[in-house]
Image (cartoon, rainbow, N blue to C red):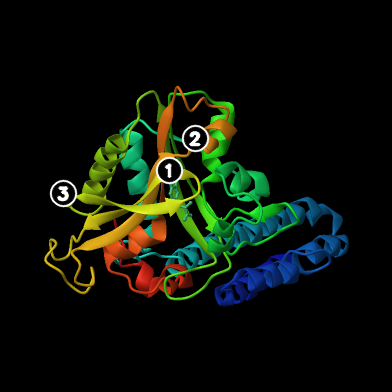
Amino acid sequence: MMKQKIEQLAVQLEASLAAVENKEQLAAFWQEFLGKKVHYSLLMTELRNVPAEERPQAGKIINEAKKWAEAQYQAKSEQIAQIELAAQNAREAVDITMPATRRPAGSLHPITIVKDQMVDVFAGMGFEIYEGPEIEDDYHNFTALNVPKNHPARDMQDTFYVAEDIILRTHTSPGQVRVMENQQPPIKVLVPGRVFRSDSDATHSPMFHQMEGLVVDKGITLCDLQGMLDKFVQTIFSTDVKTRLRPSYFPFTEPSVEVDVSCFECGGKGCSLCKGTGWIEVLGAGMVHRKVLENGGIDPDVYSGFAFGIGVERITMLKYGINNMGYLFENDVRFLKQFKD
Ligand code: DAH
């Protein structure tokens, strides 16, 4: 009787198990056959109805049947785990022979490229780098540079005022004074940085970059300045260019000069870049005014020096033939990506 029942149950179990295809169905199968108070557990309770002398034998058979059922379950469970793992592997498979998506490398901004080149040239000549504050006081930006209050030269620069005597520096020249206040000659510094003027058109931007140079020592002359600038323009533009100094005026230098470079486009014959003159203006410079040396705590009867101020945007535009400063600040990637160093 019991044996028959067990055999029937085994047939039923095999049929059910054959239909099991996933974990959920497997769990349901367990509930149906091996859970509490269902098939195999019930068999045990039915032992009560078996005559006492047959009971040990029947108990043994039931136990074996239950073990068999559990083994069936176990085997199926392993099979399903393997099937599911294989399915997961298939889903996550990566074709390692497929070409990778390349991330394009960025490039430096043209101003950064030129600024770095300029710093390199001067660092190679032994200049130290000093960076002064962008928010500057009136004294360092103007007064100490021999531009007293109400001096007409202040009109040359449209200043952004932060407070009455606090401004956004209009040039990097205050860096000269700050260096001299802290250091005695020999001085050889380069002051790169951002400057600000209320000005905006094709060749002006309210924020732009300058690079100030200052050399102070015994016996420094304009010839030293020109020799050094020759080296500078030859590195930045072309090895066969030369410089020309034209008299000019800046309150902080005496004499003051405007520095031209021979046209690297036409070699000096005259073209649209140099407007037919063969020369291109690149920077302002001069011998440091004795009052400025004094304001910096340096004795002008013992020492002399030269200074120069270079517009980084101007050099960048000349070097790359850019005719509108706006391009340098719009950050249009189509423009910027042309400047791979
Ligand atoms: N600071 C001047 C400007 O912003 C540029 C300049 C001219 C700097 C002559 C100098 C210099 O050091 O000697 O226009």
Q: For the residue labelled by badge 2, is the local secondary structure a helix, a strand or a loop? A: helix
Residue linked to disc 1: 254
The mark closer to the camera, 3 or 2, is 2
State the CA–CA distance, disc 2 to disc 1.
8 Å
Circle 2 residue: 290
Image quadrant for the C terminus?
bottom left
Q: Quarter-wise, where is residue 73 in the image? A: bottom right
Q: Which residue is mark 3?
A: 239
Dot 3 or dot 2, earlier in sequence: 3
State the CA–CA distance, disc 1 to disc 3.
30 Å
Q: Is residue 97 visible?
A: no
Determine the secondary structure under disc 3. loop
Label 2 sits on what residue type? Arg
CB under 8 Å between discs 1 and 3: no
Residue 291: x, y in percent?
Answer: 54, 37
- In this rendering, the count of numbered labels is 3
Residue depicted at 53% across the width and 62% down the height: 156
In depth, the one of 124 and 212 nearer the eye is 212
Asked whether mark 3 lies closer than 8 Å to ligand 1, one says: no
Residue at the image point whose x is 27% and y is 37% from the top:
223
Q: Marks 3 and 2, how far apart in space?
A: 34 Å
The type of residue carrying mark 1 is Glu
